[in-house]
Amino acid sequence: MIPVRCFSCGKLIADKYERYIELMGDNHPIEEIWKELGITRFCCKRMFTSHVEIVDDLLKFNRLQ
């Protein structure tokens, strides 16, 4: 799960993540994606590019009881 806000500037970013994944899957140029999403700050771009979705991997393991 991506954080709701950017760690550095506090801008709301979680609402843009789903659209970011769609555009990345359609092989759009990254600069075009940033422009469409309205992401201009480097810190916010870092939040998107460095995020790793591990929830799906964790769900494969059984829960400890």
Image: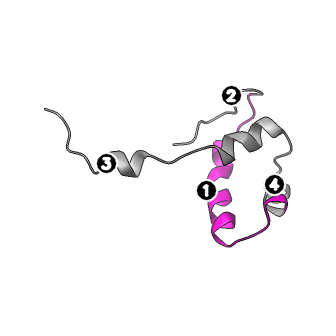
Dominant secondary structure of the residues highlighted in magenta in the image: helix
Q: In this figure, which residue is indicated by the disc labeled 1?
A: 18
**Is 4 displayed left or right of 60 in the figure?**
right
Q: Nearer the viewer, mark 3 or mark 1?
A: 3
Residue 34's label in the rendered image is 4
The magenta segment is 10-31
Disc 1 crowd rating (10 Å Cα; few below 14, some 14-19, many 20+) is few
Q: Earlier in the sequence, mark 1 or mark 2?
A: 2
Rendering quarter of residue 32: bottom right
Is residue 15 located in the magenta-colored stretch of the structure?
yes
Rendering quarter of residue 43: top right
At a point 37% along the width and 50% down the height, the residue shown is 57
Q: Position of residue 33 (x, y in %)?
A: 78, 60
Q: Earlier in the sequence, mark 4 or mark 3?
A: 4
Q: In this figure, which residue is indicated by the disc labeled 3?
A: 59
Q: Nearer the viewer, mark 4 or mark 1?
A: 4
Of the residues shown, which amino acid type is indicated by label 2? Phe
Of the residues shown, which amino acid type is indicated by label 1? Glu
Q: In this figure, which residue is indicated by the disc labeled 2?
A: 7
Q: Residue furthest left?
A: 65
Q: Are marks 4 and 3 in contact (CB under 8 Å)?
A: no
Q: Earlier in the sequence, mark 2 or mark 4?
A: 2
Foreground pick, 51 / 15? 51
The answer to whether residue 24 is above or below residue 49 is: below
